[in-house]
Image: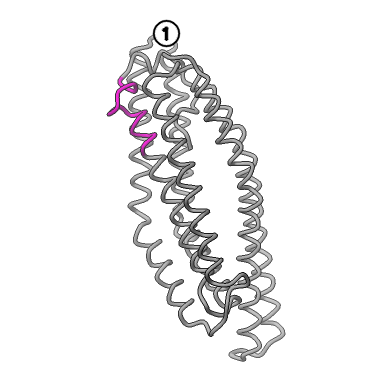
């Protein structure tokens, strides 16, 4: 989430400390960059795991179990809660101080700082649980039998590295433009750019969430069918459940791949929009 996307009057930034490098606006931009880089690194680890020279079906099933474990930690819900709190706080700043720009500026500073601390706290609170999911997933993959990824291990790893490099470049470019908006761009213009970006991303993210949910539901139904038709503890049931998990992970990746171009376009439009804003 971009804090600049909030519809807060421009003089709130001009009158407050948000325009300094150590102010809440800049700190929020830095926090978003860290999250963006973390997401890029996480995606790289996931893609690299698919490149193991082990049975691809087993690896896919392990990765799906790992992703479901991460979802179950509640970390995505905690971040969403922080975002919702921030949106409410920024809206209150506007309604509580409609004719007092200095008070509104202090209110915005506080809201941004609280949002930053909430998200950082959510990451700290979930760190151990997420790490345990990753350790369990890695152990699961190491137990898989021999095999080769469809495109070959070398090509698979090369594609993962290229994707990570492109994602990190995007993180850096967005941070640079967001920081410039904090420091020397007209706040009203930059905020309008951010609001447009949020409006652009919201339906894409909602569709992605629904698609991933459908993948998980389909997997649960497939696993239930396996258990209804195959004997407990049999190799047939194990193979059936692995196929269900691998299919669900492929489905999850397809949903992410489908969302990626739209989200990239929203980010590129935001960068171009802020670059075109006049100086503050």
Q: Is residue 121 left or right of residue 258?
A: left
Give the residue displayed 40% in from the left and 70% down from the top. 135
Task: Look at the image and tell me in which quarter the C terminus lies.
Answer: top left
Front-most of residues 229 and 255: 255
Residue 202 vertical placement versus 100 (above, below): below
Front-most of residues 21 and 212: 21
Q: How is the image coloured?
A: one colour
Q: Position of residue 105 (x, y in %)?
A: 36, 18
Give the residue displayed 34% in from the left and 25% down from the top. 109
Q: Which residues are magenta?
A: 17-30
Front-most of residues 175 and 82: 175
Q: Is residue 142 left or right of residue 195?
A: left
Q: Secondary structure at mark 1?
A: loop
Give the residue displayed 66% in from the left and 47% down from the top. 207
**How many other residues sit within 10 Å of disc 1, few (<14), some (14-19) or many (≥20)?**
few
**Residue of label 1:** 99
Give the residue displayed 65% in from the left and 58% down from the top. 254
Q: Main secondary structure of the magenta part?
A: helix
Q: Is 173 in the magenta?
A: no
Which quarter of the picture shows residue 246? bottom right
Q: Residue furthest top?
A: 99
Q: Position of residue 37 (x, y in %)?
A: 42, 48
Residue 156 vertical placement versus 57 (above, below): above
Front-most of residues 272 and 197: 272
């Amino acid at each position: 989430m971009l804090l600049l996307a909030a519809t807060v009057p421009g003089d709130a930034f001009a009158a407050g400390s948000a325009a300094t490098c150590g102010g809440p606006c800049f700190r929020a931009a830095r926090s978003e960059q860290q999250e963006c880089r973390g997401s890029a690194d996480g995606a790289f680890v996931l893609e690299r795991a698919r490149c193991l020279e082990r049975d691809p079906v087993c690896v896919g099933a392990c990765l799906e179990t790992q992703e479901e474990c991460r979802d179950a930690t509640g970390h995505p819900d905690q971040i969403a809660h922080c975002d919702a709190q921030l949106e409410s706080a920024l809206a209150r700043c506007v309604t509580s101080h409609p004719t007092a720009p200095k008070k509104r500026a202090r209110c915005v500073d506080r809201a941004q700082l609280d949002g930053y601390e909430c998200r950082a706290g959510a990451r700290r609170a979930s760190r151990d649980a997420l790490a345990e999911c990753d350790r369990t997933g890695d152990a699961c993959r190491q137990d898989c039998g021999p095999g080769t990824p469809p495109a070959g291990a070398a090509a698979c790893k090369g594609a993962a590295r290229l994707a990570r490099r492109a994602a990190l470049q995007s993180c850096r470019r967005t941070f640079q433009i967001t920081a410039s908006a904090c420091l020397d761009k007209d706040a009203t213009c930059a905020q309008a750019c951010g609001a447009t970006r949020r409006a652009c991303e919201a339906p894409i993210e909602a569709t992605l969430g629904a698609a991933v949910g459908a993948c998980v539901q389909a997997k649960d139904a497939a696993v239930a069918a396996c258990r209804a038709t195959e004997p407990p503890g049999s190799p047939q049931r194990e193979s059936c459940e692995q196929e269900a998990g691998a299919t669900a992970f492929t489905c999850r990746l397809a949903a992410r791949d489908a969302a990626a171009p739209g989200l990239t376009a929203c980010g590129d439009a935001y960068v171009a929009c802020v670059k075109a804003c006049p100086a503050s």
